[in-house]
Amino acid sequence: MEKLIIEGGRPLHGVVRISGAKNAALPLMAATILTPGRHILRNMPDLRDTRTFVRLLENLGAKSERTGDTLILDTTHLLHTEAPYELVKTMRASVLVLGPLLARFGRAKVSLPGGCAIGARPINLHIMGLERLGVTCRLEGGYVDAAIDGPMRGNVIYFDNPSVTGTENLLMAAVLAEGTTVLKNAAREPEIGNLVDMLNGMGASIEGRDTDKLTIHGCSRLKSADCSIIPDRIEAGTYLIAIAATGGSGTVTNCTPAHLPSLLEKLRGAGLMIAETDTTIHISWPETVGEKPVIGNVDIKTMPYPGYPTDLQAQFMALMALSSDTCVINETIFENRFMHVAELHRMGAKIKIDGHFAVVSGRGLHGLSGAPVMATDLRASSSLVIAGLAASGRTEISRIYHLERGYENLIEKLTGLGAKVWKEQE
Ligand code: UD1
């Protein structure tokens, strides 16, 4: 196993280019199952999770070919309709193959993802929606075994909770259904808009992009896809917070600022200056003569998009730990999403947890010190990286495979911003 070493306390400065979004890449790859053919996916990030998804598709019989950041998936000859536990357990998003396998073959057997580090994460809404389309789902031996004779039949589906992958699964199921399907209280994350664009480009008819009501007019056939993956808003947000936390300044490029409305407001609220173009964000501290920047009081509440993203909660907590005030986080999406707190304590942070609230008593911009810490999940790990970059001295983060699930070329990108960071064997 490898660990990440950071010599902290150096302000980050410079330019960092954002990769394609992991959470858009996975559903777009799943959508290639829908119809036989060679599908072209551009701006594809090379991550542990995207590689796992390619393995999952190859396990079904697909062929893959990668040139630079373009991935070609040939799903002409799929032989199986089962996603085994060994693959699903490492990546919950594997459940995304359920909808498209049912749409193309009328059957699918997918291992239940089970619990994970950030909570129970059920898939009841995916199953409820498929049943509304006429699918029979049996839960047996840790698997959901789903089947339907003939095409699915359009229906109205209401989500109690606007589930992101649930919305994506049902979109993919409904595009080849007979008649019209309406998804109400659907999730509105930009990654869903990316999937809608891909499916419409393949010949589907979906109305209501970026709204909580998606209307899908079923069609009988689709054509191959040629589609580009949107920039990763969570990666962009992570670098912005890292630059802010180290008292630096810099520009993230190849991103979509319009996909980060809540984070940019919160950063402004903390005292940072933000300048946007259509594809770049420049972040800096106001000029202060002879004084260090002061991170002001700001609270966050995680919400479905366009609210503050739960996937940027842990990173913002590291920034709050460096503020000069008391800040509050209300995590409303997932239970157990404060795993990073115990590790931040080791670096000198003062944080109290009460249910889904965290109260962070800031220690000031230079209030953290380096320590050996352990990564527990993807976003918790990036919070430790940010804390390590801002802290004085040496931080060692073990179990960095979590980071490799979601951050492309992390070390190179941070080094490009002036960080001292490298990998070592444990
Ligand atoms: C997706 C993202 C993940 C992000 C999350 C919330 C991908 C691959 N992953 O995960 O990075 O943290 O959205 O923005 O895109 N729920 C149910 N029943 C269900 C499904 C969900 O009760 O069947 C609940 C969950 O427990 C949670 C909420 O709905 O409280 C939102 O979860 P959901 O949007 O489904 O998260 P994912 O799609 O798994």
Image: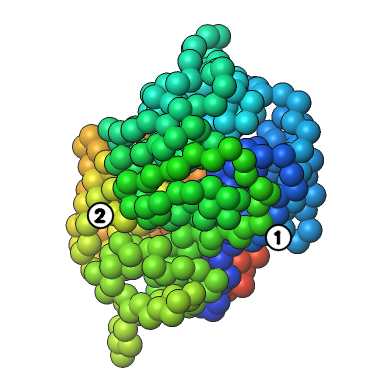
Left or right of 377, for residue 325: left
Q: Secondary structure at mark 1?
A: loop
Q: How many marks?
A: 2
Question: Does ligand 1 reach within 8 Å of label 1's beta carbon?
Answer: no
Q: Which residue is mark 2?
A: 300
Res 57 quadrant in image:
top right
Amino acid at circle 2: Ile
Which of 17 and 373 lies nearest the eye of the viewer?
17
Which of 105 and 412 lies nearest the eye of the viewer?
105
- Give percent across and percent down for residue 220: 58, 37
Q: Residue at x 49, y 39 (%)?
A: 218
Q: Is residue 136 something that shows in the picture?
A: yes
Question: Does ligand 1 reach within 8 Å of label 2's beta carbon?
Answer: no
Above-or-below relation of 119 to 291:
above
- Give percent across and percent down for residue 103: 57, 31
Outermost residue toward the bottom in this view: 289
